[in-house]
Amino acid sequence: MKSEYDVLIVGAGPAGSAAAIKCAQNNLRTLLIDKATLGRHKPCAGILPSVASFVLDELGLSLPPDVLIEPTELGIFYVPPSGRANGGELKNYRVFNLDRDLFDKWLVEKAVDAGVHLKTETALVALKQEECVEAALRIGQEVRKVRARYAIAADGAYSKVRRFLQGQRRQPVLTVTQEYWVGEGAFEDYFYMILNGKITSTYGYILKKKGGLLIGTGSLEPSTSIKSLNTLKNWLGKEFNLSLKLLKKREVGFIPYGECYLSQGSVLFVGDAAGLCNRFSGEGIRFALESGVAAADSIGNAMRSGVEASDYYQHQIQPLVNFIEQTSHLLEKKDDLWREEFVSTELKRYSLW
């Protein structure tokens, strides 16, 4: 059965857009779909390590200033249970402070510029694999069927592609609740990572964002997320003199917390849909970009060589999977003595760079 596209990409976040750009650069007929409109909002701390610039370089891109938020660059500051006095900055480690919505929109526009066929407000309603990947897409009131030689699932922690292929079983997720506040405190230009078991068994964070403060926590149990966030705010008031004046927004997001899942047949999974997220810190954008590029290159290599795309992809992405497995559940069932020692060890390790 003849396919209309070489690659169907489901989800136009960083993973999907990076994959789409690379597919186009590999001269693959590519359809990129997303259920939302262009420029949709995504709950996210919006942090991209500066080392991720090499992935953008591979796509022939450089980060434009207008997708950054003041302060545009931040250091990383670990805070152990005993407080700020025993914490410190990770030397020689910087992150970009992104406007996530503008960053995603920029990447999608670059995909279109590269020749990708984009369909927004387009929902995936069915997907199966036979001679090729067959998908049913709802666009407005109409349902259209498309065929592609390969598909890339970039549709998040609750991947619909994965559910169509595996049934309705959902993967474990971490609930991340964050609030945007007008406020003040003794904060410098850092992404403060709070490791304190009395607040949450995972992590909390606070950073400056566009003249305000973004505060969040990760919670294994959704029912405890608001309590953890309130506990963090109270603790920050004592430790950093946090004074909150006006709540601008509260939002909830989810990051994968189960095993990594890379492929099934002619479908490759990238970003959160593949479980490629740092469980320890919540970092996901860099992994999304890396896996999107790797998936696109794997498909290009497979079409030229006849070797399975999944084999190429497994080989390329295995070092990242190994890292994620090493950091998975790092903080679970650890006490605050362990957290103290961890922060001390990490600060010493980074000071040697």
Image: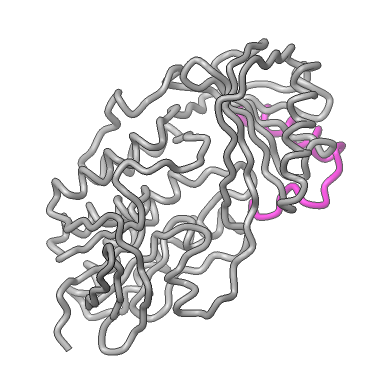
For the stretch drawn in magenta, what is the main secondary structure? helix
The correct choice, above or below, for 178 with respect to 35 in the image is above
Residue at (79, 35) in percent of width and height: 196
Q: Does 212 sit left or right of 115 as displayed?
A: right
Residue at (79, 22) in percent of width and height: 83
Residue 205 is a magenta residue: no
Q: Does 77 sit left or right of 56 as displayed?
A: right
Q: Nearer the viewer, residue 60 or 135?
A: 135
Q: Does 97 sit left or right of 179 as displayed?
A: left
Can the viewer see residue 148 in this picture? Answer: no
Q: Position of residue 250 (x, y in %)?
A: 59, 35
Can the viewer see residue 128 in this picture? Answer: yes
Q: Does 80 sit left or right of 346 as displayed?
A: right
Residue at (64, 49) in percent of width and height: 175
Q: Nearer the viewer, residue 190 or 183?
A: 183
Q: Position of residue 119 (x, y in %)?
A: 23, 58
Q: Nearer the viewer, residue 196 or 109?
A: 109
Q: Nearer the viewer, residue 75 or 72?
A: 72
Q: Which quadrant of the figure has residue 29?
A: bottom left
Give the magenta part as a residue range: 327-350
